[in-house]
Image: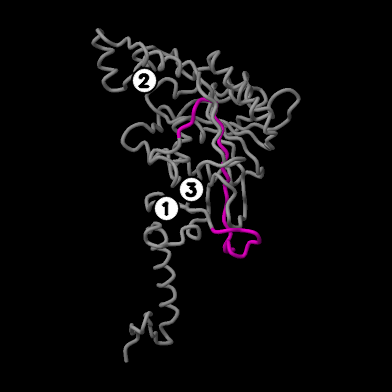
Amino acid sequence: RPRWRVGHRKDSVHVDVHPDQMAPFLWRTFWGFAFICALSGPAAGADEAACAPFTLTALPPDWACAKSKTLYLIRHAEGTHNEAESAEEARPTHRGVEKHERLFAEHASAWVLLEAATGARYRDPPLTATGSRQAERLFDEMDARSLHIELVTTSPMRRTLQTAHIGIPHLRGAATTPAVATDLLRERVGPYTCDQRVEKSSLASEFAGVDFSEVDEQDWMTSTAQEYGPNEGALLAERAERAVEWLLGRPEQHIAVVSHQHFLRALTKLSVDSPAGGLSFRNAEIQTFHLCERTQQPAATLPGRGPNLSTRALGNRERVGRPHAVQVAALKGGDGVGAHRHIDRE
């Protein structure tokens, strides 16, 4: 007799399985649903909030979390490289010089940040006077909100370190909040000198209170880990996922993350409510997100909880070969911690 039989009843499908084939049947069914969960989106009717073990949302999640973090994502204030590029956009200087016109044709106004154009002038650039004022306004906002921060994490570059020390109240005066630098949070590694950092020993002498133990002495990423070009999106997404896993591994729950435009875009680009290229951050802007390592407990069992937030699972590329899947969602508008806070650039 047949070991498998599929039949139809009214409004249902039934499958009869021979007893000695039950275990293989259940095993194949499990992996079948796992495959569908990995590939399908909202249109396919998959319960994506149950698919991925990690979520990043602009409001506290409506599900149980084995670990939870509140992240304060901050872009650095204006650096000298931002000022130079803005000046080039306002009053172009490439015209009439063949070499500069070639560079402009490939890099637009960012050509002034190339070593071929300006040497090492913008290597690991500091803040401008305008940037320092932006960071001071960031301090005023964070101080007024009385944010609880247990750890400050930052890209190991001068502009992020300066922004953190000026703009985050927890690092000023007699504050003892720990600060950790990591290359996981640095800017996209590209051909521009502003994407390069100076040696760790130089940074450690300038920012004595920061833990640089996770940073190598030399900037090996500039020469061996370029993220510029056709694979830029995939490479930044991979690094953003590693940063998420690193943050989840930290014992602290309320964490400031001081980083850069391209990296923060990569971290938020999977949001269903953000533009296709991710969320843009103004200089010295802060936005609050909630990182959750999910449990298997369904949201319906949580007291006082409403329906799940809408979410979107990662595509198959991000899942392949990784121990975890990351799932990101963001909600627009509202007040409190979920609201997008802006500090206008001068």
Task: State the residue lying farthest toward the bottom.
Answer: 1
Lower position in the chain sequence, tag 2 or tag 3 = 2
Q: Label 1 is placed on what type of residue?
A: Arg
For the residues labelled 2 and 3, the Cα–Cα distance comes to: 31 Å
Q: Position of residue 323 (x, y in %)?
A: 48, 54
Q: Label 3 is placed on what type of residue?
A: Val
Visible residue check, residue 117: yes
Q: Position of residue 310 (x, y in %)?
A: 48, 53
Q: Nearer the viewer, residue 322 or 59?
A: 59
Q: What span is in magenta?
A: 280-307
Looking at the rendered structure, the secondary structure element under dot 2 is helix
| Residue 179, quarter of picture | top right
Q: Is residue 236 left or right of residue 202?
A: left
Disc 2 designates what residue?
110
Numbered label attached to residue 328: 3
Please tell me which residue is depicted at 46% across the width and 30% down the height of the picture.
261
Lower position in the chain sequence, tag 3 or tag 1 = 1
Front disc: 2 or 3 = 3
Badge 2: residue crowd in 10 Å (few <14, some 14–19, many ≥20): some
Q: Quadrant of the N terminus?
A: bottom left
Q: Label 2 is placed on what type of residue?
A: Ala
Please tell me which residue is depicted at 52% across the width and 31% down the height of the picture.
259
Front disc: 2 or 1 = 2
In the image, residue 50 lies in the stretch drawn in magenta: no
